[in-house]
Image (tube, rainbow, N blue to C red):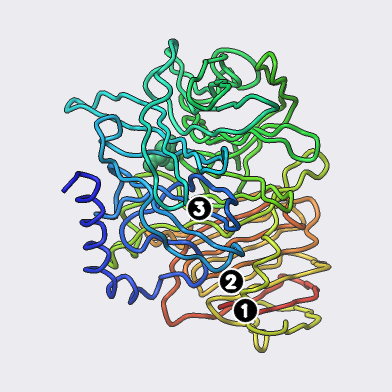
Amino acid sequence: MSKDQQLRMQAKQEEEKNKSIVEQDPYRLQYHIMPPVGLLNDPNGFIEWGGKYHLFYQWMPFKTDHGAKFWGHYSSVDLVNWTHEEIALTPSEEYEKNGCYSGSAIEHEGNLFAFYTGNVKDDQGNRETYQCLAVSEDGIHFEKRGPVVKLPDGYTPHFRDPKVWKDGDKYLMVVGAQTEDLKGAVALLESDNLLEWNHKGILAGGGSGKLSDFGYMFECPDLFSLDGSDVLVFSPQGLEPQGIHYQNVYQAGYVTGTFHSESGTYDHGDFEELDRGFDFYAPQTTLDSKGRRLMFAWMSVPDQDEQEHPTIKHKWLHNMTIPRELKMIDSKVYQLPVEELKLLRTGDASVQQVKLTEKDVKISGVSGKSVELLLENVETEGWFDICFGGAARLVYSPEQKLLTLERESYVSGITENRQCKVDNLSSLHVYLDTSSVEIFVNGGEHTFTARFYPHPDNDTIYFGAETSAEFRLLKWNLA
Ligand code: FRU
């Protein structure tokens, strides 16, 4: 049996062995993408191809921890109902023996071309990195073509996560990198045929420009145009917290500007965080046939607390965000839940005009673990809050112009928070799913994404106002 067959068989056995314990977890989600067993991290190879959306993902089937990653695979016709497909890639070859790390997919001459990082480590932990290609005719089975990019000069082996796209009659690739003087950077490569690649230089970061001293590593870069602006999304590591900014151990965000593909240069503005919650990292986008720029992100961050999640007892860890559509509004990237998520609604909305004048109010019919809430025309005097399952709380202070998400830490039980400046809160769109919450503020201008762990019997949603709060409330049950 080949190493590849062996790894596939072992993953299948692991899945079967743990199926019932995974399914019995009260914190298992209803409508988010999760691993069948083990750990999930980055979205990979996100593409609409052959009439379906394909979302591959970083998967460690054998434990709820990081290691030699596989590419797991989900497919869907509507971004809502997902089928778990056969494993796309196993780390079976020498050039990827410590993991088929993150990457992207592109269609070429009717086939699906997947680019990913072959991660290799020796006994002393020294790294080698290979940007590899695997080709699929049916979108399910991949034939590995091996490394197509060797590490260019000037970088450490922290060089990974190729994102490839077509630009005129050429192909371009951005890769997350660290320069030899230990600065985070995005490398740009170019190819005529997807097989031979030339390093054009540093696109952003490294020793110059606005991101010249911006952490020690950029992971998962993604460059695309959105409503006339060129957006670079990436996940920098090594930023110090600055007030209410950069509160997570690693960040995920973007800059906008103008990309000149001939010269390979990029003029851009300052970094903006994409999400203001606790759990959001390594986002990846694709352009679909409807012309939408769609994005998934990993609903976690690589940190030392990952092993404290209670789902580990049930042999699984982490999930994706819901799919989001990106829009450029007033030079800012807005995120909106994709239209198709309406398919999750089990019936019509309950609609009511709410006026609160006290704390801890239960609104009739408004509770549940898998629900969508839309609060419109919000007017508030003094602070106003919503509590989810007694374990997470969103509070807006119009005096401070601050929106705060608090949760009970799953490590210490102590309340921790993340904040965002919101001058005028007009709407909140909330997707609650058992042990996750995603909040879209003012039509997607800001988002908060987080896992949290309410008592499994607690499906309450309470509202409160310091003085008074008024809004129109729509609520759907989701399944
Ligand atoms: C980001 C990341 C990538 C890498 C992958 C490994 O979370 O560290 O840089 O390719 O995860 O699983």
Q: Nearer the viewer, mark 2 or mark 3?
A: 3
Task: Give residue 125's position: percent from left, percent from top.
Answer: 23, 27
Ligand 1 in which quarter: top left
Task: Give residue 419's position: percent from left, percent from top.
Answer: 62, 50
Please tell me which residue lies in front, 376 or 57.
57
Please tell me which residue lies in front, 53 or 422.
53
Q: Residue at x 64, y 16 (%)?
A: 209
Q: Are marks 1 and 2 in contact (CB under 8 Å)?
A: yes
Residue type for callout 3: Leu
Q: Secondary structure at mark 1?
A: loop
Q: Secondary structure at mark 3?
A: strand
Q: Residue at x 78, y 72 (%)?
A: 469
Q: Which residue is mark 1?
A: 360
Q: Secondary structure at mark 2?
A: strand
Q: CA distance from mark 2 to mark 3?
A: 32 Å
Q: Residue furthest top?
A: 153
Tell me which numbered mark, 1 or 2, is placed earlier along the sequence.
1
- Give residue 55's mark: 3
Query: Quadrant location of residue 349?
Result: bottom right
Please tell me which residue lies in front, 183 or 56.
56
Residue type for callout 2: Cys
Residue type for callout 1: Asp
Tell me which numbered mark, 1 or 3, is placed earlier along the sequence.
3
Residue 362, above or below 9: below
Q: Which residue is mark 2?
A: 387
Q: Residue at x 33, y 62 (%)?
A: 316
Task: Give residue 271's position: percent from left, percent from top.
Answer: 65, 32
Q: Nearer the viewer, mark 1 or mark 3?
A: 3
Q: CA distance from mark 1 to mark 3?
A: 40 Å
